[in-house]
Image (cartoon, grey):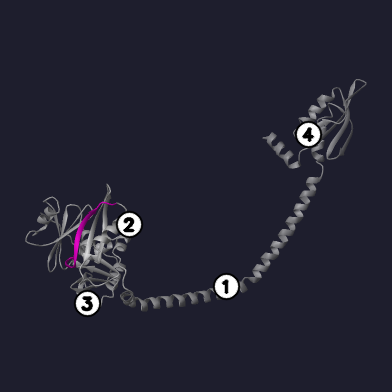
Amino acid sequence: MKEVNTVLSEQEQLPAWLRRGIKFQCVYFDDKLYRFIENASGRMELEESNDKRNNRLITVVSGRHYDELVRVYPVEKPGELQKLLKLEFEGRRFHFQTVKVENGKSTVNVWQYHSSVPPSLVVIPETFLLAKLVTAGQVLRLTTSQIYFVSNVTGVVHSQLSSSLIKDSETFAMSIGLAKEVEDLPVTIESHANALLSGIRRLTFGQIYSFFSVPEKESFTQRLKPLFLPLGILISLYLMGTSIYLYGYKSYLENGSIKYSDSLREVLAVEDQLNALQTEYSAISEFHDAQPNVKGAWGVLFSLFEAARINSISFSQERFVVNGSADKATSILELVSTHPDVSEAKFDNPTRNNRGKELFVISFTLMPASESRENVNTGAG
């Protein structure tokens, strides 16, 4: 048998918030109530409590005050499992943990408490916490007033008080089906408290909830009494601090509004001027866009002077109208239509022959000035 040097009680640093919470709201029960204290060196210890009643929220129960069982039930649904457990343990205080559910069966650990265990909001078996410290192939040996052996086999908690048959970790391991060669994990009375706290630290919220007990109204109120004063003080401080903050913030806003009112008026005045200028600019832009693109029209006509004789030019109904003659009127229409600034061109009247020339009337519309500039720039590129 190999012994492991656990110094878990010394090396595992428990957070300060956990130590404080355990000291004020957790007790250990073994015939008497023991409270958790922190000695001068920072180690947690168990000290007998002078409280006549258990008014703490969490009670860790010694293994001498409950029966630990392993049960297998032929159901898988949690609701059906709870019904079977309530039938079997009717009228008795118990908690259980579901370890495994497969093939239509549920394997559970059950802890049935003796009548000596005092009521508490949360009652946790000691061996369940100690089993949290055990890995595969290990047996935890707790040495206090008696010797307890604890192991965790694929989630199932097994524990046994030392007896004439179970004398050491090896015989205990054999009794629960483990290999003969196991690692011995010793926990002494000096490290007992920290071992329990280490187990509590490893609990999940669901596991803590499963050990919750619905208390009687009177005992529940009694356990909550120690919280009333600090809770009332915290609420009062919170309300006072909130009121002071809101008053200060209101004063800050009022002073700030006075300080920045002149600047705000200046900004609003500038904004009004900017809006007026923008409105004026938009009106000018609309007027400019509504004017005929005379510059663009001269660009089109310039290309016609060598190919045709232009008799007149007019602007009617947003179209430029050209009256003239050429050897071939269709070539003039094609020349106008293909100009990059022309949007659309057509003959307004049928062409006529006169002394070997074709007389024509061609009208065309131009693209907006902005699009004409883009076409010119594109062509230049």
Indicate the amino acid at tag 2.
Answer: Gly
Dot 3: what SS? Answer: loop
Which label was assigned to residue 79? 2
Dot 4: what SS? Answer: strand
Range covered by the magenta-colored residues:
63-75
Q: Nearer the viewer, mark 4 or mark 3?
A: 3
The CA distance from mark 2 to mark 4 is 84 Å
Q: Nearer the viewer, mark 3 or mark 2?
A: 2
Which label was assigned to residue 220? none
In the image, taking residue 210 as reference, residue 262 lies left or right, namely right
* 137 vs 380: above or below: below
For disc 4, the neighbor class at 10 Å (few under 14, some 14 to 19, many from 20) is some
Q: Nearer the viewer, mark 1 or mark 3?
A: 3
Q: Which residue is mark 4?
A: 344
State yes or no: residue 70 in magenta: yes
State yes or no: residue 345 in magenta: no
Instruction: Estimate the x, y position of residue 152 in percent, counting from the top left.
Output: 20, 55
| Residue drawn 31% across the image and 73% down it | 216
| Residues marked 4 and 3 touching at CB (< 8 Å) | no
User: Which circle's residue, 1 or 3, is located before the other in the chain?
Assistant: 3
| Residues marked 2 and 1 touching at CB (< 8 Å) | no
The CA distance from mark 3 to mark 2 is 39 Å
Q: Which residue is mark 1?
A: 253
* 115 vs 159: above or below: below
| Residue 2 seen in this snapshot | yes
Indicate the amino acid at tag 4.
Answer: Glu
